[in-house]
Structures are given as C-alpha cells and as structure tokens.
Image (cartoon, helix red, strand yellow):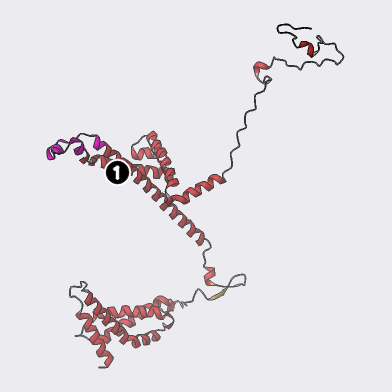
Amino acid sequence: MSKSTEALEVAVAEVIANKNSDGSPGSARQRANIDRAFSRILKIAAPRIRHFIRQYGLSAFHEDAEQVCAIAVHRAIEAYDPTKAKFTTFLNWQIRGELQSLRFRLMTDQRPSARKVEAVTITIHAGTTTPDGEETSLEALVEDEEALERTERAASDHLAHETCAALLDAYVEAERKAGIEQLRKRARARRPKRDMREARPDLPVSFRAHLAGPDPEELAALHERLERDRAIIERSLFSGDTREALSLDTSLTRERIRQIVRRASKQLARLVQTDPRFAMLAEQAGLERAGAPAEKPTPAPAPAGIMPAMHQPHNRAVTVSKPAERPADAPRELDVPVAALIPQQPGRLSL
C-alpha cells in the first residue's frame, strides 16, 4: 500500500470519527476537524484529479471539473466501507463517474445517442456566414432584438407595482393610526367598567377611565375595514375595475365605493406630496402638468363705458347721435365778457 493510500485512509478515518452517527451536525470543533481532514484529502488526491481531467478531455473546463471532483470526494466518503475496499477505490470510481457526467453535459455529441445521429458540439462564438454573404457569429444570429425592450418593460412594471403597493401601505398605516387614536379617545370618554372600579377603587374615576384601551372588537373591525378599503382602492385606481363589479364583490353600494375611492385619492395625493419616498412621483406629476397644453386664458370683460350697449335687446330702439357742430360765424345766444360775470358787490351781478 502506497503512502498516498495510507494518508487517504487516515484522513477519511478522521472525517468519519468526527461525524455523528445520527447524521446531526456536530460541534464547532468537530466541523473544523472535518474541514481540515477534507482539505487534506483534496491535497493528496490532487494529482489523481488532474490526471482524470486530462483523460476525459476536460482541460478547457478545469474549474467545472474541479468542482465535480470535490463532489465526488464527498460521495466517496459517504459510500466508504473499509470492509469492502480501500478508500482509493471508492474515490476513483466516484471521480470517473462525475467527470463522465460532466462531459456528457458539456459535449452532447459524446453521448451514445448523439453518435448515432452524428451530432456535433459547436460554440456560439464560432464564425458563420449569413445568407447575404456577411461573416458573423452564431451568437449574433440567435440574439433576440426585443429582449432589451421586454426586460425594461418588465422592470418598469415591477417598479410600478412595488410603488403602488408601498403607497397603499402608507395610506393604510396612516388610516390605521388615525382610527386607533379615535378609538382611544372614545375609550377615554366612556365611564370605567364595573370590574375596573372593583379592581382599583382607590384610583379616581378620571384616571381609571384612561386605563381602558380600545375595544378589541372595534379594533378588529377597524383592521377588517382597512383591508376591505385597500382592496377596493387597488382594484378601482390601479386595476380599472368598475363600481358595479366592486359592488357585487363587497356588498357595498356604488355611492359608498365612490366615496371611499374619492377620499383615498385625496389622501394618496397628499402622501405623494409630503412623503420623501414618493418624491419621484411628485416630480413626474409636476412634469406632466407642465407639459400639458395650457388652457386658454379667459378674456377680461370689456370696461363699461358711458355709451349704452347697442347689442343689447333693450337698446336696439335707442338712437344716439353726435350733436351737430355750430358754424363759427353763427351768433351766440349770450355774448357776455367773463369779467362782467364777476360780482362787483356781494349779492349783486352786473351785466
């Protein structure tokens, strides 16, 4: 028996000695001993592993081959029976089986069924020629041109769904806090129960009233109502369900559903404006409002003049004309100097 075979026997015996018979994980010290022994087994079997990798033609896939060989070592330790054969026998057969399986997975033309149809394994990076005579690779031929668009669309849908869910969660949490606060105020306003008075007769009535928390039944009804409202809001605002369908599913009237959705819309808009988590939604809403077509300004009413509005029905029969100008040589009715109009004495006017 060679030195490597003896070293493998000692290492595998140490692994088996530190394992529990019932299969349960051992202590930290046992796991550390198993790891050290397993590393020693891999170090001793390294030349053997490299030999089998070259023999099966897997040098180009060295990392994958080493991984399956490590799996083979684990399986060899589990299947090892010292009464039947040495550990090297179990190890060799496990390594050969794992490498053969890896070769069949990587090189499909090596399978017996592939040899019957003369299958050949090629790489997608191999060069080829298009029908137009241009040189290209198989990878370019199988490339999906719509993959990027579908990926971005799916990512956008996922982000939108998560944002809507977070927005609804914030709305429900705010409503829950407000509802619990109302229930607490209602509990404070109630008179203390009889059993509480009997339990603590030494406390004043006002203090004992504060000891009474929200009624569990009312609290459960609040949570049930919030879950129902959340489903209604989600289906109405984000899924586009009609009020008739929601009314049939929830046994609520269409008017009540309209009130719930309208109130929730205002609360959601307020959350978008105040919560920093939804700042992007607020910015997007601002951009949409800024890019929307501007409404035409309402013309200012014309200033009211002293002339009557001729287009009004009650002014159609009215005729307004400009007074005729008097000729320059026409005599005036009263031609009195201005100085003569100044009174010479109080109470008298001389002409």
Is residue 202 one of those drawn in magenta? Answer: yes
Residue 298, given in percent of the width and then of the height, sits at 60, 33
Relative to 309, residue 59 above or below: below
Residue at (44, 50) in percent of width and height:
278
Query: Dividing the picture into quarters, in which one does residue 89 lie?
Result: bottom left
Horizontal side of residue 296 vs 227, given as left or right: right
Residue at (23, 87) in percent of width and height:
10
Q: Quadrant of the C terminus?
A: top right
Horizontal side of residue 126 vs 95, given as left or right: right
Relative to 249, residue 340 above or below: above
Residue 221, given in percent of the width and then of the height, sits at 27, 40
Is residue 120 one of those drawn in magenta? Answer: no
Query: Dividing the picture into quarters, in which one does residue 254 lie?
Result: top left
Start and end of the magenta stretch?
Answer: 186-209
Q: Quadrant of the N terminus?
A: bottom left
Residue 246, given in percent of the width and then of the height, sits at 38, 40
Horizontal side of residue 175 vs 239, given as left or right: left
Q: Nearer the viewer, residue 178 or 17?
A: 178
Magenta-highlighted stretch: main secondary structure? helix
